[in-house]
Amino acid sequence: MTRKDVGIVLLIALSVVTVGRQASAQQPAPPGELSRALERSNLSAESQARLRSKGGELVGVGVAESDVADVIRQGAVGGVRAPELIRLLEVVAETKRHGLPPGPVMDKIKEGLAKRVPPERIVTVASRIAGDLASARDLIRRAEQAGVRVEAPGDRERAVEAVGATMSRFQAGTQVTADLVSMGLSPRAASETVGTALARGMNQRDIERLRERLAQELRRGESPEDGAKRLREQIRSEAPETRGDHSGPDRQGKGRDGIGDGKPGRR
């Protein structure tokens, strides 16, 4: 990937972050939520002690106590044994120790537990997501070295999440962004347009159709910038089911491991 490509990728990532960022912050967990989850789990005293230790380790490094408690609650309801729960939490701990945002990994673990996916499969998927986050961080570092800057550490973490969660669609998005620039858009407007499409969960085929849709706006007499603005407004107003063919490889739904792949769980 060229220096120009990695710069485009980061611009898209920051657009996804800007479009998808929620206005309200996550509420902190009530004090003692981890303890209450353990007490209601019907696990043995020894298992509770081991999970309390691992859970305390995660909370100590900045993982939300509510997330840890949710894993324990969902695991206990599904009959997951304490050693398996500890292994799942260890994947989150490893992610955090490597300086990566743990949110996407934690979300996937909770999703798998809620769907009663076997723990070993959840570990595989969660570990793969951690690997994607590491690749995303490296990509963003390369983009920053190429001169594209992230304004704040929090934005950098959100950009890592955005890139890691949409790696399969970013390759198409990079090419489409370059094509939109060739059609007269500024790099920032082109990246924002593709970023809007990614944040709304468009699949690869729909992203590739952005070139055709912008061309339609230009044929109506719109300037490239005005046409792109109109296109972004259309994308934001569309329900997923009203879009075109969703049979492509990035269709949202269960992945091969039985856990949904695709859109990030947090913004």
Image (cartoon, rainbow, N blue to C red):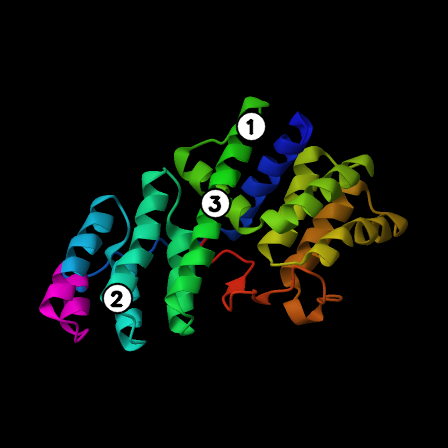
Q: Where is residue 226 in the image (x, y as percent from the top left)?
A: 75, 45
Disc tally is 3
Mark 1 lies on residue: 142
Q: Which residue is drawn at 71% across and 66% down?
A: 246
Q: Main secondary structure of the magenta part?
A: helix
Crowding around mark 1 (Cα neighbors within 10 Å: few <14, some 14 to 19, many 20+) is some
Q: Nearer the viewer, residue 93 or 26?
A: 93
Crowding around mark 3 (Cα neighbors within 10 Å: few <14, some 14 to 19, many 20+) is some
Q: Does the magenta stretch include residue 41?
A: yes
Q: Is residue 27 magenta?
A: no
Determine the image quadrant of residue 65.
bottom left
Real-space Cα separation, disc 2 to disc 3, in angstroms: 24 Å
Region in magenta: 34-49
Q: Position of residue 40 (x, y in %)?
A: 17, 74
Mark 3 lies on residue: 131
Determine the image quadrant of residue 108.
bottom left
Real-space Cα separation, disc 1 to disc 2, in angstroms: 38 Å
Q: Earlier in the sequence, mark 1 or mark 2?
A: 2
Q: Position of residue 230 (x, y in %)?
A: 73, 52
